[in-house]
Image (tube, rainbow, N blue to C red):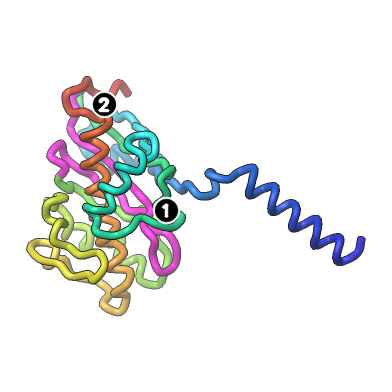
Amino acid sequence: MTQRYFYTVIAAFILIMSLGSGPAWGAVGCDLNDPDRDVARLFPGSTGYKAVSIEIQKLGGDKLLAKLEAKLRDKLRGLYETIDVPYTIYLISAKKKKIGYIHGLNQKGRFGGIQIFLVLDLDERIKTFYIQKMTGEHAEKFRAAEFGRQFVGLTVGDFEQYDVMTGKAAGKVSEIVNPAPEAEYDFKYILRGVKKNLIFVNEFIKMSPDLSAKKGAPSR
């Protein structure tokens, strides 16, 4: 086999794989590693949950995408923010009564994706902040409980005044302390991810009949 033939075969293989798998390569979702274990740990007192799958393109398409971008005040772009990304919202129950939600998503970081999960009550107020995955030398500081506790009680309304482009904040968000000042970009990415998460949950709950607070409780 000549070198030229070898490279031709490799190029053809890559082309076939990219055409055949298309959207799957671009759509990167974010689920709990072990839902049964993680839901019980993140939402004490819960007795069941239902995983609801959401896609922006199916729920509201370009119109919903534009609305999300307007609220975020930034463009959704890149591998983690395509219109076909699958999102999973865990609808949490206790004794067959809905008590809240858990939702995670991928946020671009300096060294790869940051998986940010929020545990929310029925008023969409943060009960627990949880980073499931993050790489980099300062990851442990951002995953520490002390950092996460600063988000407890915050809502999408609190983040309305946070500018994801400049990192400027007002109100309660301005009080969140960066545990690694030398990693300012990671801190900004995390705050952007939290704001994005809250906005998405707020819109998904309003638009998806499977998430309506008036519907029956999860059966699991």
Q: Is residue 159 left or right of residue 21?
A: left
Q: Amino acid at mark 1?
A: Tyr
Residue bounds of the magenta highlight: 97-124
Query: Who's the residue at 25% across and 61% down the image?
Result: 191
Residue 186, position as x, y percentages in the image? 33, 69
Residue 146, position as x, y percentages in the image? 21, 62
The N terminus lies in which quarter of the figure? Answer: bottom right
Mark 1–mark 2 CB contact (< 8 Å): no
Q: Secondary structure at mark 2?
A: helix
**Residue 156 on the magenta span:** no
Q: Quadrant of residue 42?
A: top left
- The foreground one among 69 and 176 is 69
Considering only order in the chain, which callout, 2 or 1, is on the residue closer to the N terminus? 1
Q: Quadrant of residue 174?
A: bottom left
Q: Main secondary structure of the magenta part?
A: strand
Residue 91, position as x, y percentages in the image? 27, 32
**Residue 98 on the magenta span:** yes
In this figure, what is the number of numbered marks? 2
The C terminus lies in which quarter of the figure? Answer: top left
Query: Who's the residue at 40% across and 45% down the image?
Result: 83
Q: Which residue is mark 2?
A: 209
Q: Which residue is mark 1?
A: 80
Q: Amino acid at mark 2?
A: Pro
Name of the residue lying farthest toward the left: 171
Q: Is residue 61 left or right of residue 154?
A: right
- The foreground one among 158 and 100 is 158
Query: Who's the residue at 34% across and 32% down the image?
Result: 52
Q: Is residue 191 above or below residue 70?
A: below
Determine the CA span between mark 1 and mark 2: 25 Å
Residue 26, position as x, y percentages in the image? 50, 50
- Label 1 packing within 10 angstroms: few (<14), some (14-19), many (20+): many
